[in-house]
Image: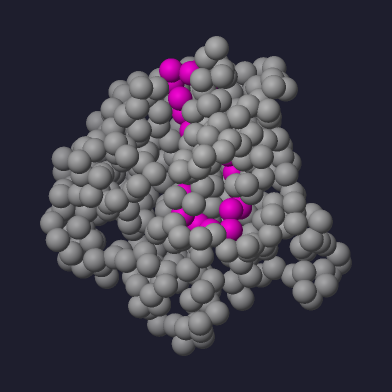
Amino acid sequence: MSKVLVSLLAGLIASSALAETPNFGTAQETDPAAMGWMQGSPPPADKVIRHSDMSLYRFPQTRWSFANFRQLVPTSDVWRGASPVSTLPVAIDKNIDALTFQPMGQDGSMTWEDSLAANYTDAIVVLHNGRIVYERYFGVMQQHIPHMTMSVTKSFFGTLGAILVAEGKLDPTALVTKYIPELRDSAFGDATVRQVLDMTTGIKYSEDYTDPSAEIYQHVRAGSVFPRPADYDGPKTFYEFLLTLKKEGEHGQAFSYKTVNSDVLGWLIRRVTGQSVGEFLSERIWQKIGAEEDGYMLVDTVGNEFAGGGFNATARDMARFGEMMRMGGRFNGQQVVPAAAVEDITRGASTEDFAKAGYKTLPGWSYRDQWWVSHDDHGVYAARGIHGQTIYIDPKAGMVIARLASFPLAANANIDPTSLPAYRALADYLMK
């Protein structure tokens, strides 16, 4: 693999923050509309973005591609259904932009508005008690445009898994092989469904993008998320890749964030329901919340969804999903997700197991059903994806934030020092 591609991938899903952020140019300087990406018939050669040469993952091209993935790669639809769109009352609070807070590890203050630019925000919607109090779009994003949610996808899959557990269709104590016997000889052969849901499996799998021999390279090539070399002869799908994984340590000992767990969960959902995950998500959640737009999933060459990070949705529909979760699974006049499933998610998991993973910006948190749970005095929990994607739910403040972004560096540790204090400051403000 070329050094250029290794460098490219290193920036995509880095596992830890860099000591110093390079100068990538400001959000204004890298505005994708102003830069003219993919404009023209055809676009000039230096403004073309492709999957085959990895330019759709290169910053600043990502500021366009994260809002236009389905133009470049295979996808499947998550239908919104034929029912009316659910209403989100609008009561914009013009004072929010001037709200100030202190970023982590800094002496000075920052305004809410400045934090949006600092984190290369593409779209953001804030709900307070079900009303839109703040909404902004930047670059090429608009209200109706779905955006890549990255690992926020995991929380959608985790919610579907929690639904199946609550309904007795998926036994969390059972071995994964009860449902997927094909995994008997893999690392997941003696893993339980719960260990997969909470990512406490002991799997030999590295997500170090600076190491071209890491398993993550094989994973994303197998699923065609990244292009394959001309001489590629490895697994041809996400599920074929899972069969090759080996154990490293024992299951159930510690939280370890490894995307392959989400692929196993996607397979479990397909096997138990007899539907694609996109179909099940549409039927059980997307149609019931009255989504404004269809969502869509990145898929491999045989249609298996990229469970680790392939869902695309609008900011408003992400906010609807978050509001439904905040309301205990009830939204749009019906119980969408069983209350027991929401309770299981918000209860969280072992903070001791989570601490072993070393997330310095998330002290005291845990990971349950593919959701990040804070255990703080507001009961905050969140869906989180690289480059700044999030659904942040603060039950005590009655607040839901849906943010889509294209921060140049992948790891949320680069963004948390401004985002998390900003979210808490806004929650405190709204509570007043």
Q: Which residues are magenta?
A: 392-412
The reply, left or right, for residue 165 in relation to residue 249 is right
In the depicted structure, whether residue 191 falls above or below residue 349: below
Q: Which residue is pictured at 21% across the width and 67% down the height?
A: 246
Can residue 213 be seen in this snapshot?
A: yes
Camera-nearest residue between 225 and 269: 225
Camera-nearest residue between 271 and 157: 157
In the depicted structure, whether residue 423 falls above or below residue 2: above
Q: Which residue is pictured at 25% across the width and 31% down the height?
A: 168
Quadrant in which residue 49 is drawn: bottom right
Q: Which residue is pictured at 48% across the width and 36% down the height?
A: 420
The outermost residue toward the front is 107
**Residue 323 pos. (x, y %):** 51, 24
The outermost residue toward the top is 432
**Residue 418 pos. (x, y %):** 53, 41
Residue 409 on the magenta segment: yes
